[in-house]
Amino acid sequence: METRTREKGSGMTKTIVAVDCVQCKETQHITVGTADLMIWEYGELIQNAMPYLTAGQREILISGVCETCFDNMFAGEEEDPIGDAETEYDIEFENAEE
């Protein structure tokens, strides 16, 4: 379901997108710029088309899974240490000249 509204005084058309989470079935209402929504629908990355949305809002638009259900799906999993500045790696390289 989509509802289009016009923001007072701005002249910019906004779209309210209603998305039902595929896990919990709760409906989320997300307000986006109509032009931004079209840009995303035509292939632009969502974070570029709608940088004002939270990660959770982007996720439900992309996958249909709300932020709470997404977090629950991955609860208890360890974070990937790659790129973690506090992780020390003990890597030894063989000398190719030997």
Image (cartoon, rainbow, N blue to C red):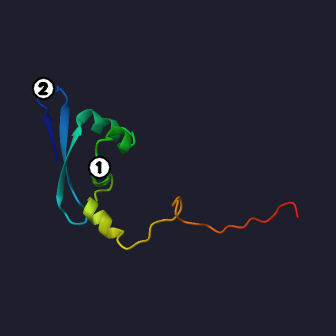
Query: Residue 91 sits in which quadrant?
Result: bottom right
Mark 1 surroundings: few (<14), some (14-19) or many (≥20) residues within 10 A: few
Q: Check disc 2 and report its element: helix, strand or loop.
A: loop
Q: How many marks?
A: 2
Query: Amino acid type of disc 2?
Result: Gly
Locate residue 72, reporting x and y percent.
Answer: 30, 69
Q: Check disc 1 and report its element: helix, strand or loop.
A: loop
Question: Residue 81, which numbered label?
Answer: none
Q: Residue at x 15, y 37 (%)?
A: 4
The residue labelled by disc 2 is 9
Query: Residue 88 sits in which quadrant?
Result: bottom right
The residue positioned farthest toward the bottom in the image shown: 76
Locate residue 56, reporting x and y percent.
Answer: 29, 54
Mark 2 surroundings: few (<14), some (14-19) or many (≥20) residues within 10 A: few
Q: Please name whichever residue, 33 or 88, is drawn nearer the observer in this view of the structure.
A: 88
Question: In the rendered image, which quarter contains the C terminus?
Answer: bottom right
Locate residue 30, reporting x and y percent.
Answer: 20, 47
Left or right of 9 in this view: 53? right
The residue positioned farthest toward the left in the image shown: 8
Locate residue 31, reporting x and y percent.
Answer: 20, 43
Query: Residue 51 sits in which quadrant?
Result: top left
Which mark is first along the chain, 2 or 1?
Answer: 2
Q: Residue at x 21, y 66 (%)?
A: 24
Question: Residue 54, which numbered label?
Answer: 1
Left or right of 73 in this view: 98? right
The residue positioned farthest toward the right in the image shown: 98
Query: Amino acid type of disc 1?
Result: Thr
Q: Please name whichever residue, 23 or 97, is drawn nearer the observer in this view of the structure.
A: 97
Question: Distance between the Cα atoms at labels 1 and 2?
Answer: 25 Å
